[in-house]
Amino acid sequence: MNGRQPSQQELRGLDPSGRLYNVDLAPSETRHWGNYSLFAFWSNTAHNLGAYTFAAGLFILGLNAWEVTIGVLGASVVVYLGCRLSGAMGQETGVPFPVISRLSWGIYGANVPALIRAFAAIGWYGIQTFLASAAVNAVLLRFFPATAGLQHTSFLGLNALSWVSFMFLWAVQLLVLSRGMEVVRHVQGWSGALIWGMMLFLGVYMLIATGGKLDLATGGASLSTGQQVLHTIQIAGLFMGILGTLMLNYADFTRFAPSQRSVAWGTLWGVPVNWTVFASTSVLVSAGSLSLYGSVLFDPADIFAKLSNPVLLVFGGALLIIAALGVNIVANFVSPAFDLANVWPRRISFRKGGLIAAVLALASLPWKMFSSPVAVNYFLGALGAMIGPLFAIMVVDYYLVRRRQVSIRDLYQPDPSGRYYYRRGVNPVAVASFVPAAIVSISVSTLPVFSAAAPFSWYFGVLLAGSLYATLARGPLASYVSTAVGPEPAVTEVQPESI
């Protein structure tokens, strides 16, 4: 980054209309997200029902414990390297993902990647909240049997008891986000640790209950050597379906990191180490449930439900709820709050963006979306397939085209004299690179004819979009990005009286 970082007062003066600036989108002035905070961020993404089901599914598919561990380790190393790239952008500039996107997409074109990321997060936010509400239902039914009567009344496809549980979790998450990123940091700091405690408890319980006699070699299906190798490799592709979106907007969190060292170590412990150990623990629990109950239980709530001790049921249910809240807040709530604020900074703050995201998630009726494989595959699947091309354009522009030379001032300058105004606020190179790559990635991920390659749609999108952007930015469309790759202008002072 060139020159000194301008103050918030200067940036506000560059954009008096509020089309590009508000205090939430300005470069961060607080740097409290150290090693542990970033590690805890990734812990929350790992320690949840979806991640447990992912690892358990690989085991029941026929992979042994070592193959699952090796596959997850290899995939998490890819994610780590990607996060080092995207995370460094946030730490160096101090700005969130939608503002970083202005570098490659233009000051107004940045709303394209921001809204794609936002709507993908909103869709999954509603679904995760709905899935977590099942744990609340179980506790209510166990200790307040009279609530069973609420299941006989339904509204918009959801019974009254599920409405109570869903709205309770919906309100709790909104309350956390409305308090700002520092509260998010504290909540995710202890929630990740609690869930690790739950998994360790289940692991130890399985070892004791089975007398240590666990079959870690197979979860059911019998695979040939070739099939085992193929499925192990496919983990690298499937993993991106879980973490590709977070890798894209990692800057939303690393912008609060005090140093690149914190980003490096927090991400190292949080992704390769944490995810691999968690996957191994999930396989251990899966193998234990297979030995004890004759089948793999894909939901930890089912394991707790089989425990006779009611205290353990409440404890387990509470931890599962905390796990769902933790991953939802960091993975599916923070991003759309910033992304929606970027659309209309003058009217939408981080908190208002979060409120809009919560309302949209509720309005999407996530229980109906979740019950429809077509909706999940074609709507959320298509949105997810666009993440790879967006990531490639962002990274190639920042490191190869721009060589990490950034003018913070011009990210908030809404007139043609700004470096990132491009053509009416949109970079044609980004559009020309994204459209064909997104079409290919969506086709591979959703069309049955490409089912064998579907797990690798993220990689297809990255390679195609990255190659196109690097070629066009230095070739046929170089004139459109000349202001982005030329010498950086000197930073000029903005006098207080001119603001």
Image (spheres, grey):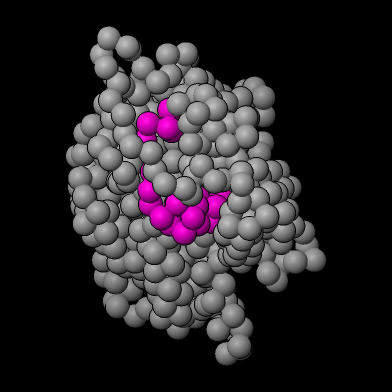
x, y percentage for residue 328? Answer: 43, 40
Confirm whether the magenta stretch covers residue 118: no
Left or right, residue 35 beside residue 170 = left
The extreme top residue here reads 497
**317 displayed left or right of 383:** left
Q: Residue at x 42, y 60 (%)?
A: 82
7 relative position to 250: left or right: left
The image shows residue 348 at horizontal and vertical percentages of 46, 19
User: Outermost residue, right direction?
Assistant: 449
Residue visible at 68% across and 49% down in the picture:
432
Q: Residue at x 57, y 72 (%)?
A: 234
Q: Position of residue 340 (x, y in %)?
A: 51, 27
Query: What secondary structure predominates along the stretch shown in magenta?
Result: helix
Let me know if residue 299 appears in the view: no
State the residue in front, 306 or 258: 258
Q: Range of the magenta residues?
A: 388-412
The number of discs equals: 0
